[in-house]
Amino acid sequence: MRSSKLIGKTFPMSRFIYFSAVSHPDNLDLAITLFNHFTPNPNLFIYNTLISAFSSLKKIESFYLYNVLLSSGECPDKQTLLYLLQAVNFISQVKQIHCQAIVTGLFSFGYLQNTLIKVYLENGLVRLAHQVFEKMPSPDIVSFNVMIVGYAKKGFGLEAMRLFHEMVGLGLEPDEFTILGLLVSCGQLGNVKFGKAVHGWMERRKPTISSNLILGNALLDMYVKCQKVELALRTFGALKEKDIVSWNMIVAGCAKVGELEQARLFFYQMPCRDIVSWNSLVTGYACRGDFASVKELIVDMVMEKVIPDTVTMISLVSAATESGALDQGRWAHGWVIRMQIKLDAFLGSALIDMYCKCGSIERASRVFKEINKKDVTVWTTMITGLAFHGYGSKALELFSEMQEDVSPDDVTFVSVLSACSHSGLVDQGIKVFSSMTDYGIEPGVEHYGCLVDLLARSGRLSEAKDIIDQMPMKPSRSIWGAMLNACQAQGDVELAEIASRELLNLDPEEEGGYTLLSNIYAASGRWSYSKKIRETMESRGVKKTAGCSSVVVDGVVHNFISADKCHPGWVDISSILNCLKNEMKPGADLGL
């Protein structure tokens, strides 16, 4: 190179640098050496080449080199800024590039504007993306697609549809990218009517899009999310090509609506299965509370050398929670430990909730202490468990400790207020309710419900009624229900009549309001009124829901419904109950 006098010449050096940095990126260090020592007068092409190379490997160097470019007197072009956008790590960098585009007069280039919109949307800055889009004098189909798909991915389905109508109004023809964004939006919104219209558009253009697997999967996903299983099955059957995503969607869709036999059938027909396939079926059985099936599936997946992940374990723990059986919960926890699954906030919260609902607050506390990074959900779940078990003072202590780590949210306050209500901590509860605005949280109907329940349980019925009258929103069923329960405990017939009337106005089919008022009348000796309420229930076709209880024997959950004689062990159970009844009679010889 020295003998041919090429060293220091800008054009040949640009070729060498491009060859080293782009064509063979492993030689990037050589390109840097050539730039630093053998290129005294680099041009814009050389700067762009290196910025492009740095954008994927040494991102911070891209911005350093851009500053060198500006210092040298060279002016960037649109490619320079596009390469810089590929190198961003922080939103502040995107905004700086945006400013540079305006200052240098490069902002008018459509491709640069579209890239800015895409980057803003990917980082959740929807408002800024919209501002860039609005300033475009004549957005093309690409601009609309970037916005529609970006909106859809970020959960702004309505905005995506609005833009689609605007696009069609401008005479622009939608393409496959537009349709993809619309299908995602329809799935999010559960708008199957519009989804069918999009499907119709696809059918009319079948020759051009029938082989598009991504669109086919998006259509399938839309019907699954709208819980239209028949349409999803039809779509799945019509797919000329199916990949593992297609199979996972149909399995998850069937499982989601409770069609578990159909989901299982598809599951075993799959040419290959991954962790998502297993989790879809496991989650379906967990939602049904079928612990035995969940347990069986997890054992099978381990046998097939598929390692369970956090999602699998959360489903297992949730199934144990539904059963309410502590031994099943401990078995699930044992699998979490055996599989060496990291105890994060999601799994930790599930375990805490499971132990609390299975009756072991001590084990829940142990799990809580083992979680290193506790988020607001973990704290709230533990507070809820303490409240559920009647440990109001401990719940308040934990609430105070929580505030040293994270800020409570509206759900946390519902849990704390419930803890105060169930433990009779009236003054503390009122203080907690009053402090909500200090955290920027406006009390909602759930919080007012807890406050009413707190006052009513403690016998302060008139104050509870005042709270209901002063609420900034309409009282809910649960608020009037709490009031009616308290009236029964206190024997306040007058307030009970008001609460019952309001409760039945909200839900005339709810049997609880009738039953409680009838019991209140009976307790006060007003039998004719009690009978009249029962007759009203009968005339309106309102039936009292039968009571139900369950017991776990040898890991099997047995459910018992009032007056139900269908249990296979009914004869033996009845015989034992009669024996116990006789032994409990006054004066019975218990043989002690």
Image (cartoon, rainbow, N blue to C red):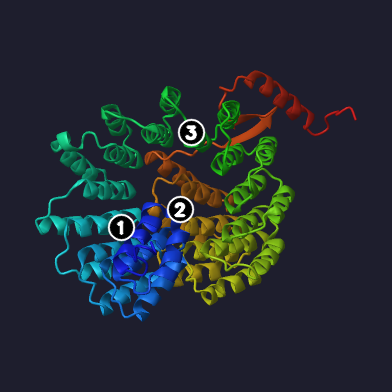
Q: Quadrant of the N terminus?
A: bottom left
Say which element carries label 3. Answer: loop
Disc on res. 151: 1
Tell me which corner region of the image, top left, top right, bottom left or bottom right, holds residue 170: bottom left
Q: 18 or 207, which is in the foreground?
A: 18
Q: Residue furthest front?
A: 3
The amino acid sitting under disc 2 is Asp
Image quadrant where residue 569 sits: top right
Instruction: Tell me the kind of residue under disc 3.
Output: Asp
Q: Label 3: which residue?
A: 274
Residue 349 pos. (x, y %)? 61, 51
Residue 483 as seen in the image, left or right of residue 181? right
* Residue 435 found in image quarter: bottom right
- Say the numbered circle drawn on residue 26: 2
Indicate which label's residue lies in the foreground, 1 or 2: 2
**Badge 1 element:** helix
Q: CA distance from mark 2 to mark 3?
A: 34 Å
Closer to viewer: mark 3 or mark 1: 3
Indicate whether 289 appears above or below 386: above
Whether residue 199 is visible here, answered yes or no, is: yes
Task: Specify the label residue 330 is tagged with.
Answer: none
